[in-house]
Structure formats: C-alpha cells, structure tokens
Image (tube, grey):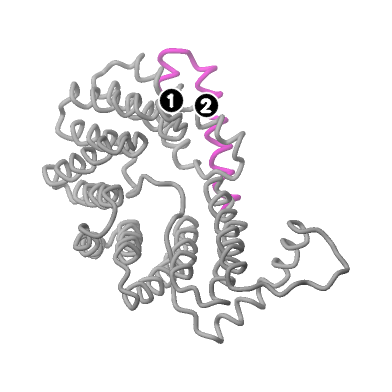
Amino acid sequence: MKFNNNDTTNKPAVTTACFEIKIKSFMKKCLNIIVFVIVCTVMMHGCSSAPEKKEGEVEKKNRAAEYARYGNDYYNQGIYDRSLDFFNLSLAYNGAVFNEKGMISSYNSIGKVYSAIGDMESAEENFSNALEIARRLGTADLIAQTLNNLGELYFRTRQFNESLAHFEEALTYKNKIPRSEIAVIYHNMGTVYKRLDDFDTAFSYFKKALTINTEKKLYEEAASNQYMIASLHLEKGDIKKALDSAEKALSLDKKVENSLGIAKDYYALGIINLRAENEEEAYRFFKQSLFIYQSLKVIYPNFTIERELQTLLEYLIPLSEKIDGSEKADEYRELQKESVLQKESAQ
C-alpha cells in the first residue's frame, strides 16, 4: 500500500535543451519533416502566389521558439507524436542558423518526449547530445538542466547510482543556476533516496526543496514536496504526520488549480485513511480522485493516466463491495476493463 512515487520531476512542461547536429543527420531529419513544414507553413501563413521572402537569422530563431511552444502545448496534453514533430521543427530551425543554445533546448525537449513514450535509448541519445554541446559552451544552467534530465531518465530505468551521480554533478553548479532549479534537483534526489529506502536522507532533500519553493511561492512544486514527505511519514507509520502533509499538498494544489496534483493528493489521502482503517473516508477520497482523472481524460483524450486509473480501481472495487454493494463494484470493474483496453491500444 504505497503512493505513486515514480515521478522524479514535478514540472510538466518541457523547458530544456539539446545537441550538436552532424550535417548528414541534420539533412536526413530535414528531409523527414519537410512535408510537415509545408503543411504547418500553409496553415499558419496562408497561401500566396507571391515569392516567399528568405528568412533571416532572427526570423529562424523566432520560428524555432514558436514551434517549441507548440511542442510544449502538445506535450502537456499527452499528444506526443505531434509534440515530437514540432520539437523536430524547432531543432531544424535552430540548426539552420547554428543556434547552439536553441539546439540544446530542442534536443532536451525531444529527449523528454522519447522518455514519456518509453523509448529510453532515443531519450538518452538526445540528452547526451545536449550535454555535449552544453559542456562545450560552458553554460552552467544548460549543463545542470541536462544533467537533471539524464538523472531523471536513469531513475526511470532503475539505474539509481547513475541517477544520483548526475543529480550530484548538477548541484555543483548550484551557485550559478536559479534556486527554483536547485529545488527541482533536491526533490529528485529525495525521490531516489526514498526508492533506496534511505528515508532520513530523502526527507532532508524534500525539506530543502520545500523551503525554496515556499520562499519562491512555487505552490505546485511545494505541493509535490509535501506529497512526497507525506509518503515518507506513511512509510514510517506516522499516520498523523502523513495526513497533515497530504492535506497541505492538497491545499497548495487547489491554490493553483493543479487538477492532476489534486487527483494524486486525494489518492494519497485515500491510502493514508485506508492504512488508518478509516475505510469510508478512504473510499470517499478514492472516488474524488477517480472523478478528476475521468474529467481530465474527457478534456485530454490522449492523456496517459491508465496506470493511475488501474491502481485506483484496485482499491475502489473491494471498498465499493463493502460500502455501496455489488452493483457499484461491477461499474468499477467495467471501468477497469475499459482502462486495460485503452492501455493495450495505446501500446
């Protein structure tokens, strides 16, 4: 009976960077996406019989930034194929003027997409290429961001020592990067130490992250810190402190209307109450969590939450049998079947 602690980062948007283009691979990538470029250009600028004016360096950089924004929008909606298309376009435009900082950003974004769809080899390749350029440029913030991305990737592939090594190296730049980025790294290190069952060390890193995020009024990030602190208290069997931290996480997520965070907080409160043998309270929180997940799925059909739904329904079905009867339990079983089918069709 545990929280979902698989996420190392609490920032959904893709914000960072990518790698050095070899001429052959760059030309191949351009050929692969040329049709998509034409379609996007027609959609965005309309048709005209007048000769197209050649874009200068500034225009190409602006176009790269524009495509990156579209990529982020699709990424946040879970539409990863379109997200990847736009990040590749951003990379192409950055590469056309050899905007190396922009290339780092594009490669890191592409790596994030590959990581999200489970192609860890491609993700690592993109992050590594980003790091190669960032190290050559000596740009501290881009080096730290890319090291953090690699640390998250290695966490997901259960290479925990490698993950920690990258986070620790990222922290060597802490005097040269924003405190908000330091908080992200602290949070990620806490997540690794928690997975390694070193709860005291994990707690210290979550508290460090929470202190920074509270000072900066980064409520969503602070909520994520409180969520993980609640999970540590539960691991230690301190129900009262676990409830207190989970309720604080919920309050912070509500402050910024973070729907996904609220759904996770309700789930956490359900788990804690179940551990305390408050089954009716647990059932109420689980139902609230399910309602939000279902609403998000309606708004964002491509949103990947099947794993969360399945875990939630595993608790809801037996509780509904006890509290609401077999008819309600059968409804949840049907939802469980639908969730399994959706997950299989997405693979």
- Give me the C-alpha separation between circle 2 and circle 1: 7 Å
Where residue 36 appears, as percent x and y from the top left, is 70, 66
Query: SS for tag 1?
Result: helix
Say the numbered circle drawn on residue 332.
Answer: 2
x then y, percent, for residue 203? 16, 41
Residue 284 vertical placement versus 61 (above, below): above
Q: Which is nearer the eye, 102 or 273?
A: 102
Q: Callout 1: few (<14), some (14-19), or many (20+) C-alpha neighbours within 10 Å?
A: many
Which image quadrant: the C terminus? bottom right
Q: Is residue 248 left or right of residue 62?
A: left
Does residue 55 appear to the left or right of 91 in the view shown?
Answer: right
The image quadrant of residue 273 is top left
The percent coordinates of residue 283 (x first, y second) are 39, 19
Which secondary structure, mark 2?
helix
Image side of residue 31 versus residue 127, left or right: right
The numbered mark, 2 or 1, whose residue comes first in the sequence reads 1
Q: Residue at x 42, y 13 (%)?
A: 323
Q: How many marks?
A: 2
Q: Magenta includes 237?
A: no
The structure residue drawn at horizontal position 49% and vertical position 59%, both measured from the top left corner, is: 113
Q: Nearer the viewer, residue 57 or 331?
A: 57
Residue 43: assigned label? none
User: Start and end of the magenta stretch?
Assistant: 318-347
Q: Are marks 2 and 1 in contact (CB under 8 Å)?
A: yes
Q: Would you name the residue on which mark 1 appears?
A: 316
Q: Residue at x 30, y 60 (%)?
A: 151
Q: Tag 2: residue type?
A: Tyr
Amino acid found under the numbered disc labelled 1 = Leu
- Which residue is more in the foreground, 278 or 300? 300
Q: Does residue 90 sit above or below 270 in this rendering?
A: below
Does 330 appear in magenta? yes
